[in-house]
Image (spheres, rainbow, N blue to C red):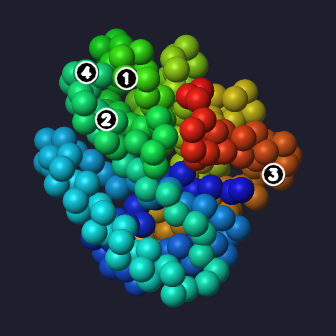
């Protein structure tokens, strides 16, 4: 299994795909790159949307997309979750259990785009300790580069989390060495394209997988695959 763990392919949900036809084209492109499974992670902003309204809209978008997928061939399979933006007190919120990936106990978090306070680390740990949910930290590369906070992956290693990195991290010459080093040391566990469209933010996981296989060998992709299976397999225990 090669999974794109971070996408915005659900039509009309956020700043990602604008239509079912665009979603199908994005999925087809991912499949042609060797991606066999895609996780749809539309943005959930608690200050803009209630959980009930978000889930209603997500179900409508998912139903529309799956209806068309059933008519197509050469597409990856699909799971649905959310990219939940950090909010104070989230470790005590009963909202989170509604926003997991599939029916499992993993939830993708988008953390603040600035240096993280100790409070943020405490809240992330609290999500696991209080609710039994394992956070998946979305696109860790975005938090490292702008603020040169290279200690983030090492601090996350102390927490009960999985770490997702974007394909661009491995495809950019300026960051590829760091990305490969973190992956090799098991500080990156899942990969995603964070694709939003077919132009400036297109599916590109296949290209990143090729770089990883060439530089680190097939065993690096196999290790990622083992994390993918744990997260996506029904009834598995949290990491």
Q: Which residue is mark 2?
A: 96
The crowd level at tag 3 (other Cα within 10 Å; few <14, some 14-19, many 20+) is some
Does residue 138 appear in this view? no
Q: Which residue is mark 1?
A: 131
Dots 2, 1 in contact, CB < 8 A: yes
Name the one closer to the observer, 148 or 167.
167
* Residue 27 seen in the figure: yes
Give the SS element for disc 1: helix
Relative height, residue 125 to residue 188 (above, below): above
Query: Which of marks 2 and 3 precedes in the sequence?
Result: 2
Rounded to the nearest whole Å, what is the CA distance between mark 2 and mark 1?
9 Å
Mark 4–mark 2 Cα distance, whole angstroms, equals 9 Å
**Element type where label 2 sits in the image:** helix
Secondary structure beneath dot 3 equals helix
Q: Residue at point 22% right, 59% down? A: 56
Q: Residue 198: x and y, percent?
A: 46, 75
Of pointers 1 and 4, the one earlier in the residue sequence: 4
Residue pointed to by mark 3? 213
Residue 110, relative to residue 153: is it above or below? below
Q: Earlier in the sequence, mark 4 or mark 3?
A: 4
Q: Is residue 212 left or right of residue 179?
A: right
User: For residue 228, which quarter of the picture?
Assistant: top right
Position of the N terminus, as image quadrant, is bottom right
Q: Position of residue 89 (x, y in %)?
A: 22, 22
Looking at the image, residue 150 sits to the left or right of residue 96; the answer is right
Q: Please tell me which of labels 2 and 1 falls first in the chain.
A: 2
Q: Are marks 3 and 2 in contact (CB under 8 Å)?
A: no
């Amino acid at each position: 299994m090669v999974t794109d763990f971070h996408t915005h392919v659900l039509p009309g949900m956020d700043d990602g795909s604008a239509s079912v036809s665009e979603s199908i084209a994005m999925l087809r492109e991912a499949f042609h790159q060797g991606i066999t499974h895609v996780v749809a992670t539309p943005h959930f902003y608690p200050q803009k949307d209630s959980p009930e309204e978000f889930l209603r809209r997500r179900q409508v978008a998912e139903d529309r997309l799956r209806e068309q997928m059933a008519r197509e061939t050469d597409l990856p399979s699909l799971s649905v979750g959310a990219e939940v933006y950090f909010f104070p007190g989230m470790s005590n919120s009963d909202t989170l259990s509604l926003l997991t990936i599939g029916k499992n106990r993993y939830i993708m978090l988008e953390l603040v785009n600035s240096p993280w306070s100790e409070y943020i680390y405490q809240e992330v740990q609290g999500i696991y300790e209080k609710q039994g949910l394992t956070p998946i930290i979305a696109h860790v590369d975005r938090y490292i580069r702008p603020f040169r906070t290279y200690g983030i992956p090492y601090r996350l290693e102390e927490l009960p989390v999985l770490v997702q990195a974007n394909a661009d991290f491995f495809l950019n010459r300026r960051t590829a060495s760091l990305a490969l080093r973190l992956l090799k040391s098991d500080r990156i566990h899942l990969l995603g394209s964070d694709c939003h469209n077919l132009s400036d933010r297109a599916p590109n996981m296949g290209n990143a997988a090729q770089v990883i296989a060439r530089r680190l060998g097939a065993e690096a992709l196999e290790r990622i695959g083992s994390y993918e299976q744990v997260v996506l397999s029904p009834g598995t225990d949290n990491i």
